[in-house]
Image (tube, rainbow, N blue to C red):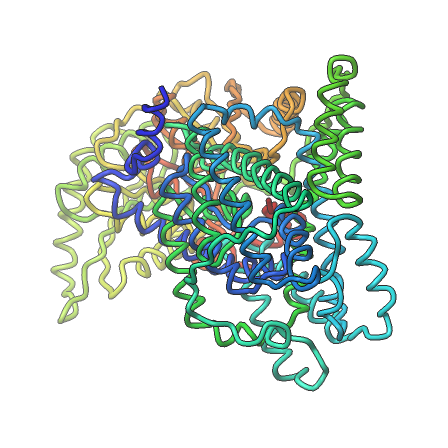
Amino acid sequence: MILQRLKLFNTFFDSRWEDLTRDTWLQTTYRDFSAGLIVALTAIPMAMGFAMAMGLRPEQGIIAGALACAVGRTWGGSKYQVYGPTAAFIPLIAGLVAKYGEAGGGTLQTAHGFLVLVSIIAGVILMLMGVFGLGKYAKLVPNSIVVGFTVGIAAVIALTNVEDILGLENFKDLLGQDEDMTGGILHNVELAYSNLNKINAWSILIGLGTFFLTKFLLRVSIFIPAPLIAIATSTLVSATLLADKGIIVVGDIYGSIPNHFFVFTPPILPAITSGVIIDIVYFTLAIVFVSGVESLLCSSMADRLADNRKTPFNPDKEFWGQGLVQVIVPMVNGFPCTGALARTATSIKAGAVTPLAGYFKAILKLALAYYIASYLELVPMACIGGILLWVASNMFKPAEIKEVLNHNKFHAGLMVYTAIMVPMTDFLTGVLSALVLYAVLFKFLDKPVKHKEMQPAEITGKLQAITASPGYFNCVTVPLAMTDEDAELLQYAAKLATQEISKEFHFVHVLPPQKHPIQPKQQEAIKQRIRDEVEKYFDTPVAGLKLNHEVMSGTSRLDKLIEYTVTSNSDLILLGHRKSRSGQRSLGRRLAMVTKASVWMVPEHTGRDIKRILVAIDFSAPSADSLSQATALAKLHGLSEITAMHVYFDASTVRYEEHVNEVKWHEVHAFEEFLSTIDTHGITVKPDFVESSIPANAILRRAQELEADLIVMSTRGHSSAVTILLGSVTSQVMSESPIPVVAIKHFGNQLGLFDTLIDNRFWEQSDTKTS
């Protein structure tokens, strides 16, 4: 068994790479590269901030984050996890550096060497835990202690970095440089209070500006490298408008930042005393605890975030990889790292699929840092304080605290106890004492309580009037290529005509740019060809049906179709698609974006009969419109039932069983409230609730499982900027669906970035939480 594990642990191409196939390697590589770039841009300022908060040099954070990701992605057990410096290590490493560094009578080199020593020992222990299959036991740590520990660490980070934002002049003599192993917060607050006369108001402005700008940009979109933009903006303001305001910068404390990051740093063992032996045990156990718990929490969350339906993460291999991270990274001028939840979430949401994203992140981070190293010394220390304050605020998760409080009084007490003890004593004392209390008392006090039901969510927005009656369109425009490719589309259009979804069909062919203007006779000849082709399929008489034929020429097919859609007052565009051509999918998405018409996309080899309809809803007014349309279409096709699918995601890392049940209850009652406002035309609507952080993938997968013939969705017609920055579920489904998709658009024309942000109420969105 052990030999099998060792073989698995050292196998590079294992199940983590199962999504990288011959058919998808190019697309997957591009997605991983994009994700790696976004995370690299985000991680540079965070890594610097973490390192400085630990009492180390800024470049050590850069090398630690890059190398940890490369090592972790090579030997770790998760497909998606991003490794790097995490906030949980800040008070731990800061305490070690303070005790064995300059503040304790030693040097930074001695302190770092001792850190390397305990990290190597911790790494070996983690590797042995993986070899002996102990990964599953890390999951036994109670959620209440994990949440309390996180809250306590958040308090430590916030309070121990206050002097950065205040801009105190005697920074070297204050916080982060001379704090003891215990009583750190009280000591820091006392020092800050005694130096209030040295506060720099401009530093406060810079620090708080960095904090709020970072928070604002990330609420707009996770694709924005908010920390880097915030620091760059604040640095520029500090170096120009506020150049003479006495703002302390990184260079004032650390000097120039070198760009030769790789420096071998061997372990150093101080003179052996009982105190040193106790410290070795203390710091080793602390590193093992943080590495084990955080990495498994992050790996588990990563699988949920990525909607991983294939091989899950391997906890034992993850311990092996974590052990190697702790052995290798500190010896190359780094420090202990583990799985970083916020960066992992950003990577997944940015499209990461395989461990390649981690390698791209490592390479791009080092490359970017190499070229901007000379500018990093200009960063105000207040900026670093602002970033760390943002990190601390994200670690404070009201939803998880509320969940523990609602679980039972015993776990609520454990959480509060841990949250107080961690900052008031020290990291390991707080956690270990909480674990002892849990072990002694859980049999007597750990009893579930009855919970109140949650109130269903209200429907957002008011349902606007639909331009035509549900299931019916005033005018349908059908673009034709005038090749054999039109046959399937015309068959599909003819079937819809017999169902009487419209009384007016316009068949349009856009000629490519002509050297000479097309003559009237030529135009009429092409029109006749269109008539002849259409009549082959529209041979079943339909009362009142009007067929129109049009030929146009122009430099842009899209522009001409937009122009025709407007002039003909079309409210539906029926568009075919061949698998070998991606252009028409792009055309369909663009038409949905910039016209007032709905778009019905029909991929090749699509059956004409519609027997099963799946409609995607999000409890909004536009999705109410699409559900009404879907039920009307179902009635026209003689169906008695359709499926309404809502994709939700619960981002809590802590989830008790009763919480999961409450979420399901919420889904059911929110759907009932939503459905009560909609005319379903006598059709039974079967609800389907699926948890996924990637709605488009969930919709496509569910459509395949249900063998659906049609997907109906609403669209607001997001602009290109919105689609790139915020993403579009409808656009992605239209891009990838193998079955017809109807994008219903009855809520205005193209929706710009500002309107989209207001519509989404971005200021109410929660930030990606930091581990």
Q: How many numbered marks have been drawn onto this rendered protein structure?
A: 0
* Any part of residue 730 in sight: yes
Which residue is at a point 22% across and 36% down the rendered structure image?
Answer: 604
Which residue is at a point 28% across and 39% down the rendered structure image?
Answer: 20
Location of residue 606 in the rendering, given as x and y in whole percent from the top left corner: 25, 30
* Any part of residue 728 in sight: no
Q: Is residue 176 above or below residue 171?
A: above
Which residue is at a point 74% across and 41% down the rendered structure image?
Answer: 422
Residue 256 appears left or right of 484: right
Residue 448 appears left or right of 519: right
In this view of the protein, which residue sits in the foreground, 629 or 177?
Answer: 177
Location of residue 476 in the rendering, given as x and y in whole percent from the top left corner: 35, 43
Location of residue 444 in the rendering, given as x and y in whole percent from the top left corner: 78, 13
Indicate the quadrant where residue 248 lies: bottom right
Q: Is residue 65 above or below residue 605?
A: below
In this view of the protein, which residue sits in the foreground, 358 or 225?
Answer: 358
On the rendered image, what quadrant is the C terminus found in?
A: top right
Location of residue 44 in the rendering, given as x and y in whole percent from the top left corner: 51, 61
On the rendered image, what quadrant is the N terminus found in?
A: top left
